[in-house]
Structures are given as structure tokens and as C-alpha cells.
Amino acid sequence: MRILLISDIHSNLEALEACLAAAPAHDVVVNLGDLVGYGASPNEVMERSRALGTTFVRGNHDKAVCGLMDLKDFNPVAALAAEWTREELTPENLEWLRAMPHGPVDLEGYPGVQLVHGSPIDEDDYVVTVRDAVEPLLMTPARVTFFGHTHLQGLFETNNVQLEAFRPAYKTVGQSEISEFPLRKELRYLVNPGSVGQPRDGDWRAGFAVYDSDSGVLTFCRVPYSLQSAQDRILAANLPPRLATRLAMGR
């Protein structure tokens, strides 16, 4: 069975459509949160995501937009974008966002696999370094945890004695590419498929991943998208220009 893993779309419709167009055949879609925030297409992204019949966990921007998280925890630009998004969303989408499940949640039909936005310990924690990954990996019972939040594509693995990190290496800056990584049954993993709508690893291309539970192979993917169109939408919405320019930098 193949699981399509998407996360941190952040209202970037162009990036989402590029990922879905490039994604191989799959059996289930998992969305790891932060559908909204930053970008200028929140309703379109939500409606497209909901139509996929995906399994969801909420992100911190999802919570902030629908009033479940205080905006004082956000920087001024992120808070402004959250307020703008709140005003833009339809009442139906806003209510649906408010009802998104709190992670971690078990992925139905896939024993040993769980989903969370930030960390299995705290949905808002950032797991960026090996040190950050130690406690979540040692405390969670799941063999594989899929998470988002950091916008950094890669994974952490442990045998309960040693812990290592892996970041996919790509050869181009503007083409579609994949990087395969076999998940070993005797190890446990924290896996981040990357950010669809706002990568922060210096690569502007949209990121996602596919996990084949039969073969155990995880495939990281990067795809180009209509960057100019996404930027133009942000500027036309009178959102801070920084939200448009940072897309090109992958930061």
C-alpha cells in the first residue's frame, strides 16, 4: 500500500497542484497540518485538500487561524497572515479547520504508524536536530512517525542505542527529482515529507513523500511549480511582500 504524505501547504495552491500532478499512484493521502497561513489561496487549498479524502492532523497555523491558539506566539508577519486568512475563509472552511484532529493519531490500517504535526510529545514542538529527536523517538511506541512543522525534508532513525539523521540530496535546482530511502523493520523513524508550500531548506521546489508499506521504501520528492503565480497572488492580496519573496529562496 502506498501513502502519499503532504504537509505545510500554507495556502500555496500552485505548489499543491504541482505535487498532486507529480505524485505516483497511491492508496491513501495523509496531510500533516498547516493547510493555511502565509499564502493567498486558503479556501482553494482547503477545498482541494478536503476533496482528496485525506487523513488530517492539525498544525499550529490551522489552530491560530480558527482561534484555538493565541497569535502572540507568532511573529508579526505570520500573525498578520493568520488574521487575513481568518477573514478570507468561508464559515464552512473555518469550522472544518476548527474540528481538525489533534495529533498524534494512529493511521488506520497501518499498525505502528502515527501522524503528528510537530512531535509525538507536543504537537507544537519543533524536531530539527538529532537532539530534538531523541525524546520523541525513545518515548513513542510507534515504529514510524510522520511529522511536519519544520518545513525540512528528511528523517531520523534509531535502534534505541544510536540515532542518525538523513536529508535527501538532490542534483538540480529546478527539475523534478526523487530520493529513495528504505526503512528497516528493526529501526524506528521520525519522517518529515517536507513542505509543499514553503520549504525552508534552501530549495524552493515543493516537497512531499510517498511511503510504500509493502516494500518499506520511502521516496522523497521535489517538484517545481508556478512560483511567480503564487507570489503574484500574495502581492495582489496585499499580504506582506516578504511572504512572496521568501518563496523563491526556500526560506
Image (tube, grey):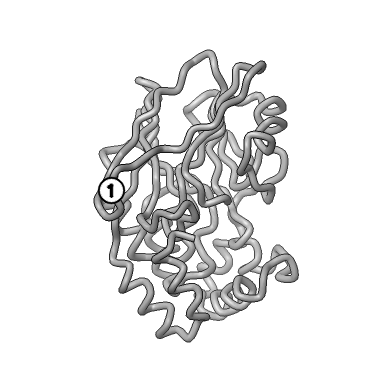
Residue 233 in the image: x percent, y percent?
38, 78
Q: Horizontal placement of 249 versus 106: left or right? A: left
Q: Quadrant of residue 83?
A: bottom right
Examine the rendered structure and indicate whether residue 52 appears above or below residue 229. above
Front-most of 193 and 201?
A: 201
Dot 1: element: loop
Residue 212's place in the image compared with 42, above or below, is above
Q: Residue at x 38, y 74 (%)?
A: 231
Where is residue 139 drawn, in percent x and y?
72, 27
Q: Residue at x 59, y 42 (%)?
A: 116
Q: Position of residue 36 (x, y in %)?
A: 51, 65
Tell me which residue sits at (31%, 73%) in the image: 229
- From the top left corner, tell me how far across and down residue 74 is, in percent: 68, 67
Q: Is residue 110 above or below residue 131?
A: above
Classify 10 Å Cα crowding around label 1: few (below 14), some (14-19), many (20 and above): few
Quarter of the figure with residue 158: top right
Q: Quadrant of the N terminus?
A: top left
The kind of residue on which mark 1 rests is Thr
175 and 139: which one is in front? Answer: 175
From this view, report whether residue 193 is shown above or below residue 96.
above
- According to the picture, the residue beneath numbered tag 1 turns out to be 172
**Which residue is outermost to the top?**
186
Question: How many numbered marks does the figure carry?
Answer: 1
Along the viewing direction, whichever of 29 and 136 lies nearer the viewer: 136
